[in-house]
Amino acid sequence: MKKPGDEIVQIIDADNRETGQCSRALMREQRLIHRACSILVFNNRKQLFIQKRTATKDIYPGYWDIAAGGVVLAGESYQQSAERELMEELGIAVNPLTFRFDFYFEDPANRVWSRVFTCTHEGPFSLQAEEIEHGCFLSVDEALELSRREAFTPDGLEILHRIKDIA
């Protein structure tokens, strides 16, 4: 099995135009702008499935994440990445995914153009042990309340604030 740092990812510029490719490890080391997908999984009660990231993740280890997803690999579309990530992280295939919005996020550790999708699934999930410790369904308001007490991925929090009126 290939290590995550060896994956070849799509590198882009500030306008989300493709400029090259490199390993995920180099992308993190040089803080290059890349693409990612974020898939918010809701159940029929409009609760969001949130996941506790493992302590071994390359960015935001041990934080809560509000979305399945990850970096877009070289040669992959946002849609293909979203479908792959759902299967890898949660063990599910969902059709259709609903496109919500694109946004740029930057902090000292990360520069990324993210495409946000939503879908509905009741579980059960088969969580990827290398990436997710555990997860649970919460209302958007409950997730926001939890974020006041525990660490959440900062890009995920931005998505959560934007999505609260849609959910």
Image (cartoon, rainbow, N blue to C red):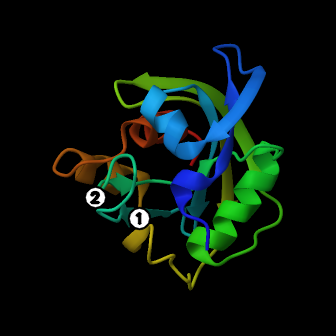
- Judge left or right: residue 150 versus residue 110: left
- Judge left or right: residue 40 versus residue 65: right
Which numbered circle lies on residue 89? none
Marks 1/2: CA distance? Answer: 10 Å
Neighbor class of circle 2 (other Cα within 10 Å; few <14, some 14-19, many 20+) is some
Q: Is residue 16 above or below residue 149?
A: above
Q: Nearer the viewer, mark 1 or mark 2?
A: 2
Q: Which residue is mark 2?
A: 62
Of 10 and 84, which appears nearest the observer? 10
SS type, badge 1: strand
Neighbor class of circle 1 (other Cα within 10 Å; few <14, some 14-19, many 20+) is many
Which amino acid type is marked by label 2?
Gly
> Looking at the image, can residue 164 be seen?
no
Picture quarter with the N terminus: bottom right
SS type, badge 2: loop
> Looking at the image, can residue 108 be seen?
yes
Q: Which residue is mark 1?
A: 51
Residue farthest along the left direction in this orientation: 149
Where is residue 118 drawn, in percent x and y? 66, 53
Where is residue 111 drawn, in percent x and y? 50, 26
- Judge left or right: residue 149 versus residue 17: left
Identified at 61% across, 26% down, the residue is 103
